[in-house]
Every structure is written in C-alpha cells, then in structure tokens.
Amino acid sequence: MAEAYAHTNIALVKYWGKRPGPLNLPAVGSLSLTLDAFGTWTRVTPGAATDTLELNGAPQAGEAVRKVSAFLDMVRALAGRTEPAAVHSRNDVPTAAGLASSASAFAALAVAGCRAYGVNLDARALSALARRGSGSAARSLFGGFVLMEKGVREDGTDACAQPLPAGDGWPVRLVVAACAEGPKEVSSTDGMTHTQHTSPYFPAWVDTHDADLRAAADHVRTRDLERLGEVMEFSTLKMHASAMASRPGVIYWRGVSLEAALRVRQLRAAGTPAWFTMDAGPHVKVLTTEQDAPAVAAALREVPGVLRVQVAAPGPAARVLA
Ligand code: PMV
C-alpha cells in the first residue's frame, strides 16, 4: 500500500498537440507553475480482485476506472507484477475552481502506484510515466516553475519535465477566476487533436512555440515577470486562436472569459503587473505578484459572471506520504 500527494499546475507556455503514436508524446514543450492550493491525494493498495477506483468517497465505474487500470498496467509491467489494486483518491480541487485535476491525479497515481508495486524510477522516468496518463501530469511531479521538453526520441524517454530551481522562492501568484460551472465541453485531448487535424494555424503554433518556451525559461531565470507575463499571454492567445480556427472551431471562451481577460489588460494599463492565461475551458488565470494579488482578485470578483476567485501560490513537488 502507498499514498502520495501531487499538486496541480497551470501552463504559462501551453502544451497543445500530440505527436503520433500510443505514447502520448507532445508536439510542443511547455512551461508551468505548480500551485500550492490544489491537488490530489491517492492511495494504491495492490491485492484486490479487480482494479477499483473510489474518488472523493464515491465508487467509480466506466471510463475513469479504465484509465486508472490502463495506467496501473504500465506500472505493473515495470514491476513484473500482475495483481489488481484498490485505488482511493481525493481531489482538493474545488468544484468549478477552474483547474483541471488530471495533472495532479496522474502525478499522484504515478508516485503512489510505483511505490506500491515497488518500482524505483528516477525523476525523469517518473515524469515520462506520468505523461502517459496526461501530458500536464508530467509537470506536476515537480514544484514551482517546471519546464517540459517535447523530446525527440520515439520511445518518449526524453518527453519529460524538469524543475527550474531558479524560480524557487519567487513570490508570484496565480489568481484563478472561475467563469462557468460544470465540466468542460471539449476535453483537452479532443480539442488538441481536432485542432491538429483541421486548423490551418496549427503549423504556425508549432513553428513559433519553441521560441516562446526558451524565452519564458530565460525570464524565469532572470525573474522578469513582465517579460514572462507577456510571453504567457502570447502563448495562450495563439493556442486559442489555433483552436478557434479549426473546423468546426473549438471555442473554450465564454463572454465572461473575455471580460475577465480585458479587465486584466485594464489593470495592466493602470500599472498593475497582471497577465492572463486560459486552458481547455472558460476559466481565466492571472499571473501577478504576491503584493498585487489581492487587488487583482478584487477586480476579477467585480467582473459580472465571474463565479469565484482564488489566489494560489507556487506549490511543492509531488511526494510519498506513506
Ligand atoms: O494534460 P492534458 O492532456 O489535459 O492537456 C493540457 C492542455 C492545456 O491545459 C490546455 C495546456 C497545458 O499545457 O496544460
């Protein structure tokens, strides 16, 4: 039996698009910030009759169990073991907080699963394993700012994340504005696959991505929030523009998302350091300083249609609890 906790993360430079094949290889790298406030606790107990999953106290069936089972099959193959497991998991990602739980969920499952089945992987291999569950999960193994390389090898061993320790202790904040209730309408996998297959802007997204990634990593190293924020907004708008230009267009934005984004630009014009990003959903996340976070949160709460606003600080790496 083993228990682990992993925090969620938000990409500042986005992952959007996959290389072909079964290994869930990204078409582009990404750069993220792990968040303290949200995460997933998971316990894996080998020796059950079949693989089971209990999430937030409720037994699961269907697709959720199938995904966990397929992931544990990879861990069992590494361990040379076959016995099924009971998996218990709890998401500390408040409903409609606007944060995906798949990143922290598969990172916690990778850590707890490897520990429970006696598989010892180094950080890179563990990250590459977590990637098989969800691309963003590869980043949630690490704390603070994290760089994910797309890699070039066909076996995916170099498609893994690494921490950017130069960013440790930088007092930035991510203000998360929830802009709608309910699950997202188009999953990130469906959205990126459809973009890749039908959007004339997808090649431009891929071609211009690496420059953003290298620049963002440099801006973390030099702690240049202004430049990091600028490239962050550029990356998210390019990702969404490529998705919108697919056929039919994938639109994650609601009216309130646009209002919140424009409010961030107004704040910036008035001198507040604040930049927005959005993922495969309508929620708006704003990078700012520790000092400015309360004012940014207050401004976003005033935007009609914003449901909830929470402030997150940089969070730690995933860890084994027992
Ligand atoms: O990890 P996935 O497969 O859910 O994809 C994440 C995609 C985005 O959230 C839109 C961007 C990212 O890099 O996290």
Image: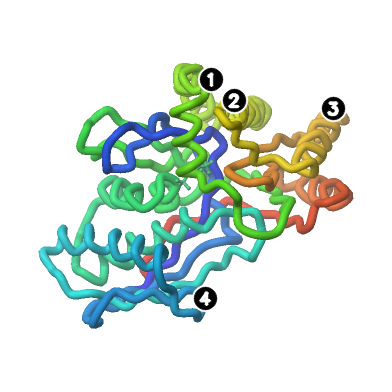
Residue type of the residue flagged with mark 2: Ala
Mark 4 falls on what kind of element?
loop
Q: Which residue carries the number 4 mark?
A: 56
Q: CA gap, disc 2 to disc 3?
A: 29 Å
The quarter of the picture where residue 93 lies is bottom right
For discs 2 and 3, the disc positioned in front in the rendered view: 2
Q: Residue 122 appears at what percent x and percent y?
A: 24, 51
Q: Is residue 268 visible?
A: yes
Q: Residue at x 39, y 30 (%)?
A: 27
Depth check: 255 or 90 in front? Answer: 255
Q: Residue at x 52, y 24 (%)?
A: 199
In the displayed structure, 307 sits above or below 303; it is below
Q: Residue at x 27, y 63 (%)?
A: 72
Are dots 1 and 2 in contact, CB under 8 Å?
yes
Q: Residue 233 appears at what percent x and percent y?
A: 65, 30
Q: CA gap, disc 3 to disc 4?
A: 42 Å
Q: Is residue 224 visible?
A: no
Could you tell which of marks 1 and 2 lies nearer the N-terminus?
1
Q: Quadrant of the C terminus?
A: bottom left
For discs 3 and 4, the disc positioned in front in the rendered view: 4
Q: Which residue carries the number 2 mark?
A: 245
Q: Residue at x 74, y 43 (%)?
A: 254
Are dots 1 and 3 in contact, CB under 8 Å?
no
Q: Which residue carries the number 1 mark?
A: 201
Q: Which residue carries the number 3 mark?
A: 269
Could you tell which of marks 2 and 3 lies nearer the N-terminus?
2
Q: Residue 20 appears at what percent x and percent y?
A: 30, 33
Is disc 3 surrounded by few (<14), some (14 to 19) or many (20+) residues within 10 Å?
Answer: few
Could you tell which of marks 4 and 2 lies nearer the N-terminus?
4
Is disc 2 surrounded by few (<14), some (14 to 19) or many (20+) residues within 10 Å?
Answer: some
